[in-house]
Image (spheres, helix red, strand yellow):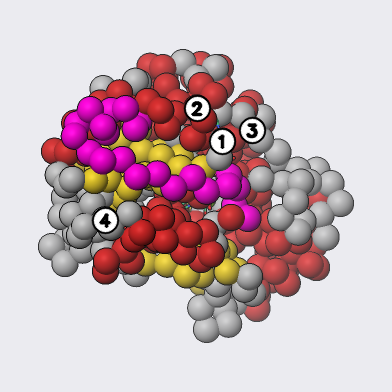
């Protein structure tokens, strides 16, 4: 079992623990009771996670004395909407929940983001507990307090900051993850390593086989080290005014690729892998990143089974999509570029940088 405490500036939220434990779901009830005692608790899960883990989680919560209310949403990003959140609010309000009732998110990032919005708005805000069941949600989505849903105008456009009281990750649940979901989680882990910790990069390199096989000890260390990075960044910058922007490494290119692909055929983590390659090549071309390490990053992403090239990618459309990304400040594109394996910075680009950015995109389609 590994554990760390997130302490935010006094204005943001109370400190909370992130616990990482194989089999931890069996102790969910007692752990929730320790931070959010109440007569009832409100679980949000999805149609794929529910059949696998709801019984175990609900039994533990009931064993700790809670009346367990459950809202099961259909699985998938397409259902991360205000309508789904509204349905969950109906379920819990009709069951007469109290202000002390914790909302427990049992699932991946979709469930976590949506349940967090429900927790932030139910009776003007109730305690929120995250029980992430995907690698991505464990290392990324569950840490930091950003919650929300999608809108037809774009992803995550409706939301709030609502910090959890506890994050409990049962890494044994990752064993049922589709391999592609595991690889997408690893893409964000590689991103964390590149922006902040060369040692983590080396750890992933030397444990790829074990990580892909969901070896318990390797996964536990991976999650703990990644959570430490994300939590450190969030503690420094809870409302995303500064250093938190580094977490967008690979994402401005990646979002544009997802957009051009119409959000089909490519998973978010795969787009992030491609975006990371593009950002790294751009940094190297600017003379700001050691050229020899470009290949090292590509080799690791390939070993994980992530794409590093996308033949036929349309450079014009991808560049145009980047320019409309929400991270554009005052019409100028802000890009996160690595300066080494283990460090990155935000670069404000101008007209002179356009050819370089286009070459970086083109390198993905040519390779
Ligand atoms: P997800 O929640 O859709 O989970 C992926 C798929 O795996 C789903 O079909 C789910 O039902 C299934 N699943 C989940 N756990 C499983 C398990 N243990 N065994 C078998 N199947 C399982 O997606 P995700 O990748 O976890 O999260 C992506 C979401 O997270 C996006 O909506 C993204 O916007 C959000 N996100 C939020 C933040 C944040 O800071 N709040 C950060 C990153 C991503
Ligand atoms: Mg991401």
Q: Earlier in the sequence, mark 4 or mark 1?
A: 1
- Magenta stretch: give its range: 57-78
Q: Which residue is mark 4?
A: 97
Task: Give the residue displayed 51% in from the left and 78% down from the top.
Answer: 329
Of residues 48 and 303, which is closer to you in this image? Answer: 48
Q: Which residue is mark 1?
A: 48
Q: Is residue 362 magenta?
A: no
Q: Which tag is nearer the camera, tag 3 or tag 1?
A: 1
In which quadrant will I find the N terminus? top left
Q: Which residue is mark 2?
A: 52
Residue 140 in sight here: no
Q: Position of residue 69 (x, y in %)?
A: 34, 45
Q: Position of residue 85 (x, y in %)?
A: 46, 60
| Discs 4, 3 touching: Cβ within 8 Å | no
**Cα gap from disc 2 to disc 4, whole angstroms:** 26 Å
**Cα gap from disc 3 to disc 1, whole angstroms:** 15 Å
Q: Position of residue 210 (x, y in %)?
A: 51, 16
**Cα gap from disc 3 to disc 2, whole angstroms:** 18 Å
């Amino acid at each position: 079992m590994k554990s760390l405490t997130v302490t935010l500036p006094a204005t943001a939220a109370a400190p909370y623990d992130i616990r990482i434990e194989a089999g931890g779901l069996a102790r969910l009830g007692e752990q929730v009771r320790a931070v959010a005692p109440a007569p009832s608790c409100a679980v949000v899960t999805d149609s794929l996670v529910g059949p696998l883990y709801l019984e175990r989680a609900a039994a533990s919560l009931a064993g700790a004395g809670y009346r367990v209310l459950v809202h099961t949403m259909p699985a998938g990003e397409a259902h991360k909407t205000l309508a789904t959140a509204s349905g969950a609010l109906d379920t819990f309000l009709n069951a007469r929940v109290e202000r002390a009732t914790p909302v427990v998110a049992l699932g991946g990032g979709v469930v976590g983001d949506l349940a967090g919005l429900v927790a932030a708005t139910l009776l003007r805000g109730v305690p929120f507990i995250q029980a992430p069941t995907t690698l991505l949600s464990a290392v990324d989505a569950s840490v930091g307090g950003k919650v929300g849903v999608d809108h037809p105008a774009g992803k995550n456009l409706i939301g709030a900051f609502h910090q959890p009281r506890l994050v409990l990750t049962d890494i044994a649940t990752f064993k049922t993850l589709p391999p592609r979901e595991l690889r997408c989680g690893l893409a964000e882990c590689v991103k964390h390593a590149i922006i902040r910790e060369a040692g983590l990069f080396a750890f992933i390199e030397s444990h790829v086989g074990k990580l892909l096989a969901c070896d318990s000890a390797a996964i536990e260390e991976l999650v703990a080290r990644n959570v430490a990075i994300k939590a450190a960044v969030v503690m420094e910058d809870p409302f995303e005014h500064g250093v938190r922007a580094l977490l967008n490494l690979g994402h401005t290119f990646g979002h544009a690729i997802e957009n051009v692909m119409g959000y089909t055929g490519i998973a978010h983590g795969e787009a992030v892998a491609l975006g990371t390659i593009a950002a790294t090549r751009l940094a190297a071309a600017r003379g700001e990143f050691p050229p020899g390490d470009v290949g090292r990053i590509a080799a690791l992403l390939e070993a994980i089974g992530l794409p590093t090239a996308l033949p036929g990618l349309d450079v014009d459309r991808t560049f145009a999509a980047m320019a409309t990304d929400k991270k554009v400040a005052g019409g100028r594109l802000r890009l996160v570029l690595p300066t080494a394996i283990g460090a990155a910075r935000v670069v404000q680009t101008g007209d002179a940088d356009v050819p370089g950015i286009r070459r970086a995109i083109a390198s993905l389609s040519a390779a």
